[in-house]
Image (tube, grey):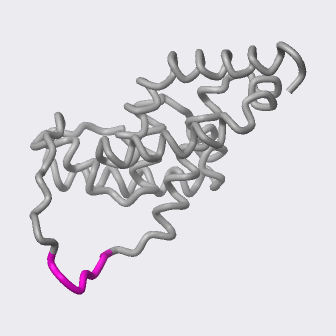
Amino acid sequence: MDGGRGATTVEDFAEFVKEALPGLLRYGHMLTGNPHDAADLVQTVLERVGARWQTIARKTGDPVAYARKAMVNTHVSRWRRAKRESLLADLPDTPDVPRDDPFENEPLWEALRGLPPRQRAVMVLRYYEEMSEAEIAAVLGVSRGTVKSQASKAMTTLRGRLGASVGGA
């Protein structure tokens, strides 16, 4: 670090985290489907962003957009690596205590949570972030056609799960 500039960079990053954290956690919750995975996702991404903060702050016009794109990419990568089920040799001694989820039993949220990760990412980016198909394609690194097909499949699934209460897109 160079003299006083290193301290300023750390302070800049701390201010960025202070301002952006609530929105990033909400965004992560929408992507992952629960607040615990969202917190892990945000922490992972902020560690990476913090390590490269000077470059990110200098070269991007919007560090929050950069962090959101990194969250989507990290989430999709985790989903691809994750196995669909975890087999245990023995049952745990104590049962897990369920934590309260403010969206528990909310029909739209439950239906959204049930979508495959890429479809959920497309829906979150389209309707929560209000991005265009081209912007979503750029964020996810896919074609516009893939964005359209994933959105169509997601809407079909949501309509089926929620009935006629979900309007057209």
Q: Is residue 103 above or below residue 83?
A: above
Q: Position of residue 29 (x, y in %)?
A: 35, 40
Q: Is residue 145 left or right of residue 53?
A: left
Residue in the image at 36% along x and 40% along y = 30
Q: Quadrant where the C terminus lies? A: top left
Residue in the image at 48% along x and 28% along y = 130
Asked whether 81 or 94 is in front, the reply is: 94
Q: Is residue 41 above or below residue 86?
A: above
Residue in the image at 65% along x and 43% along y = 48
Q: Position of residue 63 (x, y in %)?
A: 66, 26
Q: Quadrant where the N terminus lies? A: top right
Q: Position of residue 77 (x, y in %)?
A: 55, 60
Q: Main secondary structure of the magenta part?
A: loop
Q: Is residue 68 left or right of residue 117?
A: right
Residue in the image at 37% along x and 60% along y = 116
Residue 47 located within the stretch drawn in magenta: no
Using the rendered view, name the quadrant where residue 39 is placed: top left
Q: Which residues are magenta?
A: 85-91
Q: Position of residue 27 (x, y in %)?
A: 42, 34
Q: Is residue 22 left or right of residue 75?
A: left
Q: Is residue 18 above or below residue 117?
A: above
The residue furthest right is 2
Asked whether 127 or 105 is in front, the reply is: 105
Asked whether 46 or 61 is in front, the reply is: 46
